[in-house]
Image (tube, grey):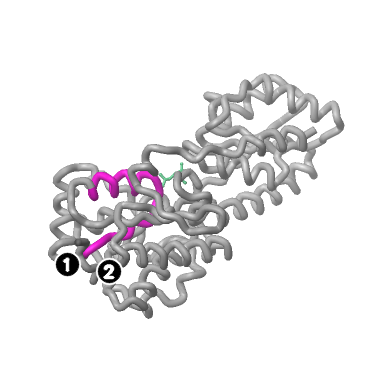
Amino acid sequence: MAKKIKKIGVMTSGGDAPGMNAAIRAVVRACTYYNIKCIGYYRGYEGMIENDFIELTSRNVKNIINKGGTILKSARSTAFRTVAGRKQAYENLSAENVDAIILIGGDGTFTGGALFSKEYDIPVLGIPGTIDNDIFGTQFTIGYDTALNTVVEAVDKIRDTASSHNRLFFIEVMGRDAGFIALNAGVGAGAEEILIPEEDQPLEKLIKSLKRSKRNGKTSSIVIVAEGDKTGKNVFELAEYVKDNMEDYSPRVTVLGHLQRGGSPSCADRVLASRLGVKAVELLLEGEKDVMVGIRNNKIVATPIVEIMRCKNSINRELLRISDILSV
Ligand code: F6P
């Protein structure tokens, strides 16, 4: 029989995402509601290894639902990748009588969690928190919606100056391995072209499309480039390439960078984080372990973490087609 859960440890790990605080708040308040203890580890797995934690009560998490970042801080731990690091973390958890852990993060976080739950008998529950939206087992990750809105707002502003000066802009957005942000924000902001890691787009196609736009009377254009696009050129080299091939263009480049990870979470992210946080605690109390909670068709679902690591969410190719049609 599964051990009764009396104390839960929660942490945030990997790249931070708006809404992580709302998720921490939901976990802590659900623990209070069900009369169990909760402690928060600082800097993800690093805090577990260094035994750096704080006791969390409902009052500790007041006024954070609207805050970006994470009050528990975040890190990508190299020590946790070692056998010794994970052993130290387990010993610390046992000494504190922590019965289960809730991990809020992305794929790196869950890789660590999968390994840990295989080696040690401690239930692990995942909550997807990353702006990249690249986690299998959920249609939306916490932080993605806010990041999309941030990108669209920034591109709208760049469009103003692009239009005033009849300029072409290359805008780099986050997404080392996934094009969810680029594709959705690209369509939402009316980009001319969208370059993503999932699609090997020849550079000639880009030039052809920009030339077609010029012929059709467009005076300014926006190209959205995901960090991990497959052109083999970075965003500055892309701009140079276009300049060399279209002399009448003097392209400009904007890298949006980490501003995409900050800011107050959108309402959608706050609601998602609240639902996932409560469900994570409830599943642990029901004896569930080694799963990640996610959302599918507006229902909260749980998927084994090993499956999350094995599978990938695919991008919506229909959006590429829509983007092509609309950039005419
Ligand atoms: O959070 C995920 C992510 O935003 C990726 O899209 C990006 O490549 C990466 O984080 C950059 O993170 P950092 O600067 O923290 O290494």
Q: 296 above or below 59?
A: above
Q: Which residues are magenta?
A: 99-117
Residue 259 can be seen, yes or no: no
Residue 176 is situated, as x and y percent measured from the top left of the image, at 47, 38
Residue furthest to the front = 1
The C terminus, quarter of image: top right
Residue drawn 34% across the image and 77% down it:
32
| Secondary structure type for disc 1 | loop
The N terminus, quarter of image: bottom left
Residue drawn 19% across the image and 58% down it:
50
Quarter holding ligand 1: top left
Amino acid type of disc 2? Ile
Residue situated in front as seen by the camera: 190 or 210: 190
Residue 260 is situated, as x and y percent measured from the top left of the image, at 54, 51
- All told, the count of numbered labels is 2
User: Mark 2 — residue?
Assistant: 39
Q: Give the image quarter of residue 53.
A: bottom left
Viewed as shown, does residue 166 lie left or right of 73?
Answer: right
Q: 296 above or below 19?
A: above
Q: Residues within 10 Å of mark 1 (few under 14, many from 20)?
A: few
Residue 1 is a magenta residue? no
Q: Give the image quarter of residue 283.
A: bottom left
Amino acid type of disc 1? Glu
Residue 103 is a magenta residue? yes
User: Mark 1 — residue?
Assistant: 96
Residue drawn 36% across the image and 71% down it:
28
Residue situated in front as seen by the camera: 65 or 153: 65
Callout 1–callout 2 Cβ contact below 8 Å: yes
